[in-house]
Image (spheres, helix red, strand yellow):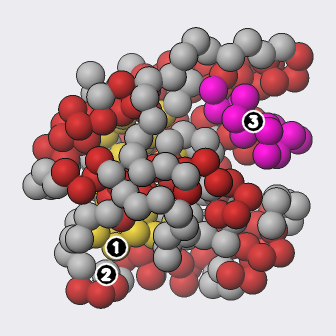
Amino acid sequence: MRLAMWSGPRNLSTAMMYAFGNRADFHAVDEPFYGPYLRLTGLNHPMAIEIRESRPEGPFEVEQSLIGPIPNGKPHAYHKHMCQHMIDGIPRDFMADCVNVFLLRHPARVVASFTKGYPQAGADDIGFEKQAELFEHCRALGQTPVVIDSADIRKNPERALRQLCETVGLDWDPAVLTWSAGPKPYDGAWAPHWYKSVHGSTGFAGAEGPLPNLDGRAGALADEAMQYYDFMVAHAKN
């Protein structure tokens, strides 16, 4: 199985990669299209030079790696994807060969967290509209993609991940509930900037508190994303 997890930034996506990467039967891949995305857009993201140098492959080379043999003889692969990377020039044919899952987080939480590390972030950078578009793309392929909310995972990780595994046809493995602290060999080059918090973790954090109060540009950005979040929540598993 190739399990493709689709989210925007700051969506519990790295913790989920660590969870499945901790299973002995999974190979983990961290944001495989980040390099091609930066070359196509010319965006000056944090550590952009290091990212482009670490990911020199073209987008179609990346696609072939995702649908080719899974390394180390593993039966399954976990692909951590950022929805906002899927711009024109990034192929989507490989999605037909994946089990596609969409990971949500409330826009106010995403904006509050992401803009701390990338203050100039705009709607395209947080990926909510693109996530809804990719969800519809999967449905056009005849798939019924799974939608999960990170809030449900944090409230009860075992319940949420048991349900996810059952839905996609995976055996349950409690290894997904914990992982070792520190960097992982499959971390992307951007980990020193973005993964400091999760590197200090050994499992999922508890339920989050009240939504952050946002105003000005940040509030407008979160408000703009709500229509897409609401659309996706309507398809989430409870």
- Residue 50 seen from this side: yes
* Residue 69, x across and y down, in percent: 31, 85
For label 1, the crowd category at 10 Å Cα-Cα, with few meaning under 14, some 14 to 19 and many 20 or more, is many
**Alpha carbon of mark 2 to alpha carbon of mark 3: how far?**
34 Å
From the image, state whether disc 3 or disc 1 is nearer to you.
Answer: 1
Residue identifier under label 2: 70
Q: Which comes sooner in the sequence, label 3 or label 1? A: 1
* Residue 51, x across and y down, in percent: 73, 73
* Residue 133, x across and y down, in percent: 53, 40
The image quarter containing residue 192 is: bottom right
Residue identifier under label 3: 123
199 to 42, vertically: above or below: above
**Alpha carbon of mark 1 to alpha carbon of mark 2: how far?**
7 Å
Residue sitting at x 13%, y 44%:
166
Q: Secondary structure at mark 1?
A: strand
Q: Nearer the viewer, residue 121 or 22?
A: 22
The amino acid marked with disc number 1 is His
- Residue 96 seen from this side: no
For label 3, the crowd category at 10 Å Cα-Cα, with few meaning under 14, some 14 to 19 and many 20 or more, is some
Residue identifier under label 1: 27
Name the magenta segment's main secondary structure: helix
Q: Which comes sooner in the sequence, label 2 or label 3? A: 2
Magenta segment boundaries in residue numbering: 109-122
From the image, state whether disc 1 or disc 2 is nearer to you.
Answer: 1
